[in-house]
Image (tube, coloured by chain):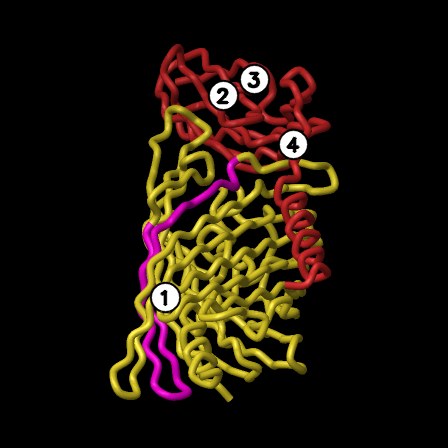
Amino acid sequence: MKYTIGCVLLIVCMLHVSKACDVCGASSSGQGLGLLPQMNRHFAGIQYQYVELHSRHVPLSELKPVTYSNEYYRTAQLWGRYCIGDRWQLFVFAPYRFNNSTHLQGNSANGVGDISILVNYVLVPNSDSYGVIQHRLQAGTGIKLPTGKYTGISEQDKRGLPNMQPGSGAFDIPFNTNYTLQYRSIGLNTDVSYVLTTAGADGYKYGNKLNVQLNSFYRTKYRSVILLPMVGLRAEHSGHDYDNYTKKWQNQQSGGYILSYVAGMQLYIKQIGVQLQYSRPCAQYYSVGNINAVQRLDTGLMILL
Amino acid sequence: MKITTLNIITTAVLILTCIACKKETTTPGTTEEISITITSPKENDSYKPGDTVHIHATAQAQYQLHGYIVRIYYGDSVLFDAEGHTHSNQLNIDESWVNSLNMAAELQLEISTVIDHEGNAKKVKRPLKSQP
């Protein structure tokens, strides 16, 4: 029985692989963990994220016309988990970013992004559960290293767009908590992540990011194939950036929130898991209303080692 | 769940909440505190058709400026309208305009230093002349 429950949790909790947090998944974002394999096993995977924004450019001069553009943030990311004993887990994220905008005849930025390392401690393992209700809680912190290319404050930064450069040019401190509750084939997962940003060498500081995601899921099995449909909500909040953090020069054009519906499906065959998730915002106010998230797609492939 | 575990969770949530709700501040400023220096053109400089008006100026403040707008007026008509979206306490303004008029006219150069997107700005003006 324990083995069966463990297997179910193992599969179910692969449901929701890591998400780049922050409004839109830019390079200053953090790493939410979502639902994870809950057994003490290492894994490695690759993810691809696509985020589309629509932005409005209001000129300083009232004589000039307002213009519009689309921004596309694409991230391919290698990630993995290494378990140290029963309670400690080490996560590593290595993204590669492809961002581009249609503004001003188009511009793009590609390259290796900022590598993140997270250490989590399992506060409540499954073995703490009683009866048919299973629950698990883990929390941790880490560091995001400025390994990605960053050339200083950009025109996009000034306009409040999430950072389009591959790197953020600064160290950030991510925090996360992750709680999963399951009753038989249905369950809930709550993932809260917060990124405490620091200023880069040029004094620019991206806003702190808070990401909260609540997912409900259901497990169904056909032979050796396990399907996991899910629906949920994701709330993302970004504080204002600072043009010069030492002098507390706040970029009023930046920051805001996005609340999104989330729907997805997971497919698992033995040790291989495939993720597909789509989200659209249902409420948002970002960059004083000049930037709107349009849609987001997350896909992933994971192999348990 | 053990009491110690609960304590750890409660503490972690409280810390996260405190960090998440921290109020971020900004430094306000007024337009009176802005200093604008126009080094070119000089007052009442004259320009013939096709001549280039080189506009060089700096704007400084003790707080963050948002950008600038440079315009050249002929009466109420705007002959030239340029802007720079630069977040800094010092703006270096470098623009140019080719005189498109073919007549004698009194022109007005206006440089606005913008401090926000609500239209708050400090303006300085300089008379110019167009010659046939």
Q: Report crowding for label 3: few under 14, some 14 to 19, many 20 or more residues within 10 A (C-alpha).
A: some
Rendering coords of residue A197 (x, y %):
65, 52
Which amino acid, mark 1? Answer: Ile
Badge nearest the viewer, 4 or 3: 4
Q: Rounded to the nearest whole Å, what is the CA distance between mark 2 and mark 1?
A: 54 Å
Q: Which residue is mark 3?
A: B123
Which amino acid, mark 4? Answer: Gln
Chain label for disc 4: B
Badge nearest the viewer, 2 or 1: 1
Indicate yes or no whether the magenta region holds residue A279. Answer: yes
Q: Quadrant of residue A276?
A: bottom left
Q: Pointer 4 and pointer 3: residues touching (CB < 8 Å)?
A: no
The answer to whether residue A122 of the structure is visible from this angle is yes
- Horizontal side of A304 relative to A201 (left or right) equals left
Q: Which residue is mark 4?
A: B64
Task: Check the rendered structure and report the hue given to chain B.
Answer: red
Q: Residue at x 57, y 24 (%)?
A: B113
Q: Pointer 1 and pointer 3: residues touching (CB < 8 Å)?
A: no
Q: Give the magenta-colored segment's residue range.
A: A253-280
Rendering coords of residue A14 (x, y %):
44, 74
Secondary structure category for the residue under label 3: strand
Secondary structure category for the residue under label 4: strand
Q: Which residue is mark 1?
A: A186
